[in-house]
Amino acid sequence: MDEAIVRPATRADLEGYRRCIGRVAAERRWLVFIDTPPPDALHQHVGGMIDRGLPVFVAVAADDVVVGWCDIYVPVFNPVRAGFDHVGVLGMGLDADWRGRGLGGRLLAAALAAAEALRIERVELDVFAANERARRLYERHGFVVEGVRRRARKLDDRYEDVIAMARLKETT
């Protein structure tokens, strides 16, 4: 396999992005999703993130197939819920054949650098406890465990703990 490139996503990437999420979701282990998201919902959500200039990155293989993504979502400002516009929520995933090759680290580094440039001070995420590879990746990039939601998911008659992690930008 050739190397994939990491770059900011464009609206032209949205269908490939959606298909990649679907392939990872079909594994029923790593994501909250267990199926491919509907096109309209994903295009509205991720397309809206792209339009707002939020960190949305894709890993694209030589054949122009999206094989991974990393994004940081910041909710639209709501004055009723003031005080949280410095917080972003990270989501990411990689096709199985592309894991363990450093691509996740490259995606994550790109998204975190973009978040810092946007003055996003706190990036948080949830990860399933069994996903040790992802947990180690997040820790290498400065995330710390903030808590565990025990038996938070029950899928296929199996419970999974969810670990809440966050990375804080030092403020002066």
Image (tube, rainbow, N blue to C red):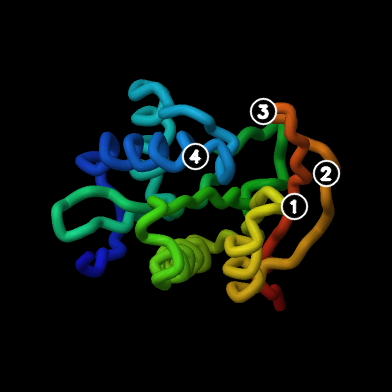
Question: What is the spatial separation of the Cα atoms under label 3 and label 1, in whole angstroms?
Answer: 22 Å
Query: Label 3 neighbourhood size at 10 Å, few (<14), some (14-19), many (20+)?
Result: few
Q: Is residue 8 left or right of residue 164?
A: left
Which amino acid is tagged 4?
Glu
Image coordinates for residue 34, horizontal then vertical, percent:
52, 30
Question: What is the spatial separation of the Cα atoms under label 4 and label 1, in whole angstroms?
Answer: 21 Å
Query: Label 2 neighbourhood size at 10 Å, few (<14), some (14-19), many (20+)?
Result: some
Q: Vertical placement of 31 versus 56: above or below? A: above
Image coordinates for residue 132, horizontal then vertical, percent:
65, 61
Secondary structure, mark 1, is strand
Return the residue at label 4. 27
Return the residue at label 2. 149
Sequence-earlier tag: 2 or 3: 2
In contact (CB < 8 Å): disc 2 and disc 1: yes
Sequence-earlier tag: 4 or 1: 4
In contact (CB < 8 Å): disc 4 and disc 3: no
Q: Vertical placement of 134 versus 39: above or below? A: below
Which amino acid is tagged 1?
Ala
Which amino acid is tagged 2?
Arg
Which mark, by number, is residue 76? none
Return the residue at label 3. 156
Which mark, by number, is residue 164? 1
Query: Which quadrant would the N terminus be assigned to in this image?
Result: bottom left
